[in-house]
Amino acid sequence: MKSLRIMLLLTLIFGGYRSFAASEVETQFELANKLYAQNKFSEAAGAYEQIITNGTISSVLYFNLGNSQFKAGQLGQAIAAYRQAERLTPRDPDVRANLRFALNRVQGPTIKSTASQRWFGTLSLNEWTVLGFAGIWLTLGLLVARQIKPALATALKTWTWLSAGGTAVLFICLALALPQNTPGRIAIVTVTDATVRNSPLDEAPGAFTAHDGAELRVLDHKDEWVQVTDDAQRFGWVKRSSVNWSPRS
């Protein structure tokens, strides 16, 4: 396991943080780091979570939160935090290494990422979007150049079609990557043993047991229950209180 990171990358949404607010977040972050260094992992995790709850979103925060939760024995919560960090910085070697390390500790049924999911996950949704719109602007620029400089129309024709085709491919990739990053697609077990039942009732027979850190694909939800499945195509309902899960907005 890699240790926590000391540098905090602040995300200042819409310029909404004033200087004193940024300073306050940095102070809270330093306090959380000190708690971690003192082996007070549960307290450190709570401190990092408080910063996130207050509106600061950062891969570093989620990475350190995951480290703290892992050290505190909260495997499922740690994996959930690493997944958040992965969405923000999908190619970060430390995030990927720690996530893989934590996933290897999971016992029993879970879902595994496919090759296509791993490939589409090499870029964040923001990166796919930026590339797609860059392709649009490049294509428009080539079309304008052909209008302004008719002599270049023939020479630029092939490049225009290539740019348009590449842009279409990028937006197809964005569409395919979007479901993988949609909140509510995956539920992560955060208790030692979670009984997945045949129906959303406490007295329903158990279908199977999922252990701390197991990732289950979400199919539906009802009241305090979430319908899930694993790679073995077993279906059932698990209590929301037993998993880390955010419904689709």
Image (cartoon, helix red, strand yellow):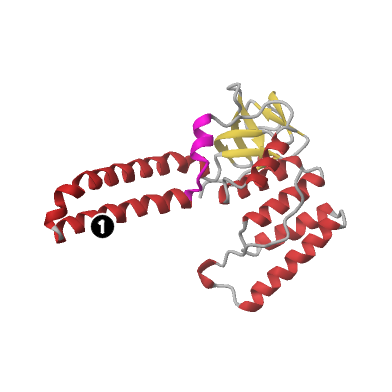
Please identify the residue farthest to the right as the structure is shown: 38
Indicate the secondary structure of the residue bearing disc 1.
helix
**Residue 212 rendering spot, x and y as whole percentages:** 74, 35
Q: Residue at x 60, y 42 (%)?
A: 223
| Numbered label tally | 1
**Residue 64 rendering spot, x and y as whole percentages:** 72, 53
User: What amino acid type should be assigned to the residue bearing mark 1?
Assistant: Gly
Please name whichever residue, 203 or 75, is drawn nearer the observer in this view of the structure: 75
Please name whichever residue, 117 or 3, is drawn nearer the observer in this view of the structure: 3
Q: Identify the image quadrant of residue 49.
A: bottom right
Is residue 128 positioned above or below 29 on the image? above
Q: Identify the image quadrant of residue 74.
A: top right
**Residue 73 rendering spot, x and y as whole percentages:** 81, 42
Is residue 30 positioned above or below 159 on the image? below
Q: Residue at x 74, y 70 (%)?
A: 27
* Residue 29 sits inside the magenta stretch: no
Please identify the residue farthest to the left as the structure is shown: 150
Q: Identify the image quadrant of residue 166.
A: top left
The quarter in which the N terminus is drawn is top right
Chief secondary structure of the magenta span? helix
> Mark 1 — residue?
141
Q: Residue at x 59, y 25 (%)?
A: 231
Q: Is residue 78 left or right of residue 221?
A: right
Q: Is residue 101 left or right of residue 180?
A: right
* Residue 121 sits inside the magenta stretch: yes
Task: Tell me which segment is drawn in magenta.
Answer: 115-125
**Residue 61 rendering spot, x and y as whole percentages:** 68, 57
Instruction: Sort mark 1 into few (<14), some (14-19) or many (20+) by Cα contacts within 10 Å.
Output: few
